Image: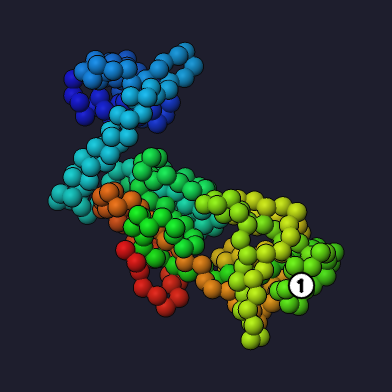
Amino acid sequence: MDRFDAMQAFARVVESGSFTKAAETLHISKTSVTQLVQQLEARLRVRLLNRTTRQVNLTADGAVYYERVVRLLADMDDAETGLSSASVSPRGRLRVDVPSPLARLILVPALPAFHAQYPDIQLDMGVSDRTVDLIGETVDCVVRGGELTDQSLIARHVGDLQLRVFAAPSYLERAGTPTHPQELEDTHHRIVGFRWARTGKVFPYAMRGDGESVNVLGRYVLAVDDGNAYLAAGLAGLGVLWLPDYMSGPHLARGELVPLFETWRLDPMPLYVAFPPNRHVSIKLRVFIDWVAELMKEHAPVAGRGDSQ
C-alpha cells in the first residue's frame, strides 16, 4: 500500500462524502479507493469511516486522523511547490473563507484573471460572514472586516472599507429624510440591523461631524448576519443602513439608494487576511494573499496605514 495514495483517497472520500465521487476526482476506480481506505484502516487498526448505503461519516478517530492528514498532504504539496519550476507555478488546494458581498462583487468576478495566472491552484471558497475555526475546519485563511479580536491569528491589513449611510427612496418616502444621525433613534425611524458573528449583537455606529460625535444604535424590524441579506433589506426599504463604497456604488448610480448625512464621517473598517500562526505560509497561500491585497488597492485602499503581519 502506498500510504500517500491511501491518505489522499481517504481525504477525498471525506470531502466528497462518497467513494464514487472520490474515485472520479482521483481518476481511479471506486474499488481502488475502497481498497486503499480499507488498507489504511488495517494499518492503523482503527475504523476511520462509518459506511451506510446512503452516506459516509467520520468516526471520532477518523475525524482526528483526517485533520492531521489534511495538514500532512498540504505540507507535502508545499514541499513540491518549493522546488524548481513548481515555485514559478504554485499548485494545490487552498481553503479560504470570505464575506459574501466581497465574494460576489469583487473576488469571484476577478477569479478568471487569478486562475489564468495560477491555473494549478484549486480554490475551495467558503462564502459567509460567520466566525470560522481556522484550525478545526482546516481553513488556510479568512478575509474579514473589522478589528480582529483573536490575537493568536497572524493578519495582513489589505484594505480599509469606507462606510457611508444610505436609505432606499421607498423608506424615505414613508419615514421622511433624517438630517441628523441622532434622528435615527426616534421612534418612527428604523435601521437594518447587522448581527456580528463574533458576538451575535448589533453594535452602534460612531459618527463624527459638525463638531460633534454620536453613537447611533437605532431600532430595527430586521437584523441579519449576512452582508448580501443586509443590502437586500435596505434596498427593500426596511431601514437605514451603513455600507462600504464597493457595495453601495452601483445602487447609488441607479438611484436605488440615497446618501444621508454626507458631512458626517465614520472610521474606516479595516479589512484583513488572517491565518493561524501554526499554518505554514505556502507559496499558493502567499500569492492568494498578494492577489487580494492588489484587488483592494483598487476597491478599498488602505487609508494611510501599513500592513500588519
* Amino acid at dot 1: Glu
Q: Nearer the viewer, residue 250 or 100?
A: 100
Q: Nearer the viewer, residue 185 or 305?
A: 185
Which residue carries the number 1 mark? 183
Residue at coordinates 27% horizontally, 53% vertically from top-left? 281
Q: Secondary structure at mark 1?
A: helix
Residue at coordinates 32% horizontally, 17% vertically from top-left? 47
Residue at coordinates 38% horizontally, 51% vertically from top-left? 141
User: Is residue 156 something one can see in this rendering?
Assistant: yes
- Which image quadrant is residue 6 in? top left
Left or right position of 143 against 33: right
Residues packed near mark 1 inside 10 Å, few (<14), some (14 to 19) or many (20 plus): some
Residue at coordinates 29% horizontally, 52% vertically from top-left? 277
x, y percentage for residue 190? 76, 62
Outermost residue to the left: 84
Classify 272 as above or below 297. above
Left or right position of 175 against 288: right
Outermost residue to the right: 174
What is the quadrant of the N terminus in the image? top left
Outermost residue to the top: 53
What is the quadrant of the C terminus in the image? bottom left
Classify 157 as above or below 87. below
